[in-house]
Image: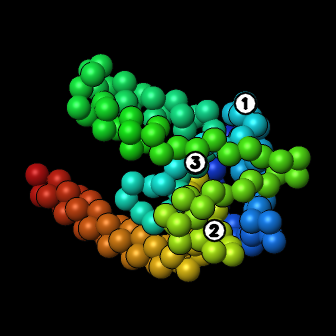
Amino acid sequence: MSVRAAMVQFVSNYTLRLDAKGRVSIPAPFRGVLARDGFNGLYCYPALDQSALDAGGNALLAEIEALIGRFPPYSEERDQFSVALLGTSETLSVDGEGRVVLTEPLKAHAGIKDAVAFVGLGQKFQIWEPGRFRAHLAEATETVRTLKTRLGDRMAAREASGARE
């Protein structure tokens, strides 16, 4: 990925505490991506396959719309994706200091109480309860190590079979 591409994507992770009023600051690099995306807010919905929240700006909304648009109008699949992704989305306002208030349903889905982990995933980011994120990161790291080993083994086998020809 080029430096320019990294500047318009959500990368890295940050752990921040909620304040007494339940607000949390969006990390400055993430606010920068949202600003370049042209959205002064945050689309946020419960992740479909994790106890986390998916979040982002116009690029995320466009990605969701493109996914839903793959299905014929009035189809069951289109309706199901629309309900799961758009029907549970919330548009959160970002205050002048770059903070948002996560709603109770969003916090309940992710198990968030007093701190959050913001995790960049390129076109979107996720918001996790920090302990759950650490466990997820450990699992993801182990999975990637296994996949890397398998890929290396396949490449070595391909090279060995090519050398015999």
Residue for badge 1? 38
Tags 2 and 1 touching, CB below 8 Å: no
Q: Amino acid at mark 1?
A: Gly
Residue for badge 3? 44
Pick whichever, 13 or 117, lies toward us. 117
Above-or-below relation of 97 to 62: below
Please name which of the two marks, 3 or 2, marks the residue nearer to the observer.
3
Q: Earlier in the sequence, mark 2 or mark 1?
A: 1
Pick whichever, 128 or 145, lies toward us. 128
Secondary element at tag 1: loop
Secondary element at tag 3: strand
Q: Is residue 156 left or right of residue 47?
A: left
Residue for badge 2? 117
Above-or-below relation of 138 to 73: below
Tags 3 and 1 touching, CB below 8 Å: no
Tags 3 and 2 touching, CB below 8 Å: no
Residue occupying image coordinates x 27% and y 60%:
155
Furthest residue toward right: 96
